[in-house]
Image (cartoon, rainbow, N blue to C red):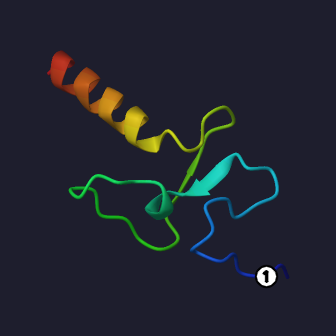
Amino acid sequence: MGSIPNPNDIFPTQYKTTCFIKNIVTAPNISIGDYTYYDDPEHPTDFEKTIFYLTILNLATN
């Protein structure tokens, strides 16, 4: 069995496509657990930009 990743690391794997988002999100209105992760093969640290974009799209279609 592999070791448990350190939740204070940004990238828990060697591939650097997955990141623990509590270490990259700066918005105070987003609550995140220690082991919450986001996987994106191109821009894994762009979680806030992605969630903002999806929120705008959702608001525009409703």
Reply above or below: 35 against 39: below
In the image, 23 versus 3, the foreground residue is 23
**Quadrant of the image occupied by residue 57:** top left
Q: Residues within 10 Å of mark 1 (few under 14, many from 20)?
A: few
1 to the left or right of 29: right
- The residue labelled by disc 1 is 3
Q: Position of residue 47 (x, y in %)?
A: 46, 43
Q: Amino acid at mark 1?
A: Ser
Considering every residue shown, the one lying at the far right of the view is 1
- Which quarter of the image is occupied by the C terminus? top left
**In this view, 60 is above or below 12:** above
Find residue 40 and report its horizontal and vertical position in percent.
Answer: 62, 39
**Residue 34, relative to residue 27: is it above or below?**
below
Horizontal side of residue 11 vs 1, given as left or right: left
Total marks placed: 1
Percent across and percent down for residue 3 are: 79, 82
Side of 1 where 39 appears, left or right = left
Report the residue at 47% width, 55% height from top.
24
- Report which quarter residue 11 is drawn in: bottom right
Vertical placement of residue 44 versus 52, above or below: below
| Foreground residue among 60 and 28 | 28
Left or right of residue 38, residue 59 in this image = left
| Residue at the spot 35% in from the left edge and 54% down from the top edge | 26
Q: Please tell me in which quadrant of the rendered image residue 14 appears.
A: bottom right
Label 1 element class: loop
Question: Quick one: which residue is furthest to the top in this view?
Answer: 61
Q: Position of residue 58 (x, y in %)?
A: 24, 26
